[in-house]
Image (tube, rainbow, N blue to C red):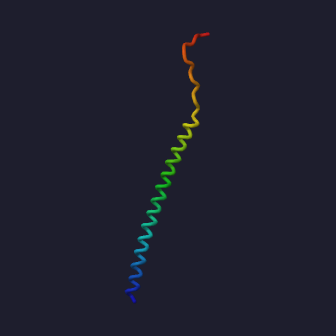
C-alpha cells in the first residue's frame, strides 16, 4: 500500500511541475501579446498623425513683384 502512496505523490509532483511549465508558457505568451499590442498601438497613432497632418499651402510659382 505504501508503494501506491509514493507513486501517487510522484504523479502529483509531476503534474504540478507540468502545470507550472504550462502556466509560465501562457504568461510568456500573454506578455508577448501585450507588448506587440502596445507596439501596434504606437504604429497606429503615428499613422493617424501622418494622415491628420495639415497640408502646407503651396507657394506660388514664378517671380513676384513688390506692390
Residue 40 drawn above or below residue 62:
below
Which residue is at the far front?
61
Which percent across, then down, holds residue 60?
57, 19
Place residue 14 in its image quadrant. Answer: bottom left
Q: Residue at x 53, y 40 (%)?
A: 47
Which residue is at the far left?
3
Which percent across, then down, holds residue 8?
41, 82
Residue 56 drawn above or below residue 67:
below
Q: Nearer the viewer, residue 59 or 8?
A: 59
What count of labels does the image hold?
0
Q: Quadrant of the C terminus?
A: top right
Q: Quadrant of the N terminus?
A: bottom left
Q: Residue at x 41, y 85 (%)?
A: 5
Residue 2 falls left or right of residue 45: left
Which residue is at the far right?
67
Q: Residue at x 42, y 67 (%)?
A: 21
Q: Residue at x 56, y 37 (%)?
A: 51
Q: Nearer the viewer, residue 6 or 51?
A: 51
Amino acid at each position: 500500500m505504501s508503494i501506491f502512496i509514493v507513486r501517487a505523490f510522484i504523479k502529483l509532483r509531476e503534474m504540478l511541475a507540468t502545470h507550472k511549465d504550462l502556466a509560465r508558457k501562457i504568461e510568456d505568451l500573454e506578455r508577448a501579446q501585450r507588448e506587440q499590442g502596445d507596439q501596434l498601438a504606437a504604429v497606429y497613432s503615428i499613422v493617424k498623425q501622418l494622415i491628420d497632418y495639415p497640408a502646407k499651402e503651396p507657394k506660388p510659382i514664378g517671380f513676384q513683384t513688390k506692390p
